[in-house]
Image (spheres, grey):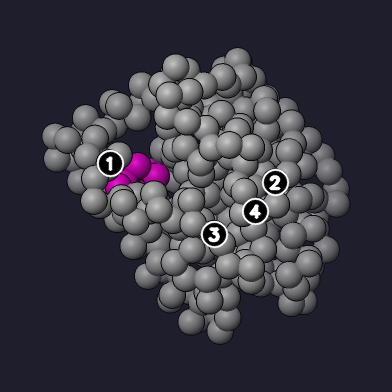
Amino acid sequence: MSTVSADARMAGAPVAPIWGELRYGAELARLLSDARLRAPRPCADAQPVLLIPGFMAGDASLTVMRTWLRRRGHRVAMSGMLANVDCAGRAVERLEAQLERFASDCGGPLVLIGQSRGGTLARSLAVRRPELVSGLAMLGSPVRDGLAASAQVLRTVRWIARLGDLGLPGVFSTGCRDGECCAGFHADLHAPLSPDVHAIAVYSRSDAIVDWRACVDPHAESVEIDSSHCGMSVHPAVYRVLEHALDRRT
């Protein structure tokens, strides 16, 4: 499958109807009603995990996943983000330092799990520091084209970028798209991943936020589920994918 082109994106790459995102509540309810997932089997050799939230979201958006991972026995570190809207170049540098500290504290490599934009940041970390990363899970992450998104999302991106242009700290600007600050980050999204990093890219054709084709990473194992975009952090199918991936790494 070829990379989603900028021309296709500018013409309005197809995404599912936005009302599909209303499934979040039902997806969470199904997860909480699944006794096996609600009370997972503890793993004696569970690897540490670093969680990174999606665009405009903070660590609180991954509370359910963090709780599930801890019940499995994983040490879990959060990104420290209140809202994932910083310049990607700055965000990756800060996360890299956090990755180094957490890996040193744990005495070994980590598993990175990122939702949406968080998955693109996680991929960049895996490319830069493969010796510190044993696994990577990208949930609805547009690694092939970060702007292959719905019209509503692109309007929000432009609005936030204007705030960055005005000098609001901790916010990306219009210059980040093609600027030197994010050049390394963009290169990381297309670079091969180390064979020692078991990478999974989860996508949904009914994703109403990003074009699912942009989430299919040619260097990762692609797994299709039927989920809303926001619901990937609470969808039972995602947890089964993660359970399998984490168990094969332990």
Residue with the mark numbered 4? 220
Q: Position of residue 238 (x, y in %)?
A: 72, 45
Asked if 51 appears above or below 54 in the picture, the reply is: below
Q: How much space separates mark 4 and mark 1, taking CA atoms?
A: 25 Å
Extreme residue toward the front, this view: 2
- Residue depicted at 78% across the width and 65% down the height: 247
Q: How much space separates mark 2 and mark 1, taking CA atoms?
A: 28 Å
Query: Which is nearer the eye, 173 or 52?
Result: 173
Q: How much space separates mark 2 and mark 3, taking CA atoms?
A: 15 Å
Task: Report the amino acid beneath label 2.
Answer: Ser
| Callouts 4 and 2 close, C-beta under 8 Å | yes
Task: Report the amino acid beneath label 4.
Answer: Ala
Residue with the mark numbered 3? 192
**Earlier sequence position, callout 1 versus callout 3:** 1
Q: Can residue 136 be seen in this view?
A: yes
The part of the chain drawn in magenta is 82-87
Residue with the mark numbered 1? 178
Q: What secondary structure is marked by label 2?
A: strand
Q: Does the magenta stretch include residue 186?
A: no
**Earlier sequence position, callout 2 versus callout 1:** 1
Q: Position of residue 65 (x, y in %)?
A: 64, 51
- Residue depicted at 64% across the width and 68% down the height: 195
Query: Which is nearer the eye, 180 or 111?
Result: 180
Residue with the mark numbered 2? 222
Q: How much space separates mark 1 and mark 3, taking CA atoms?
A: 21 Å
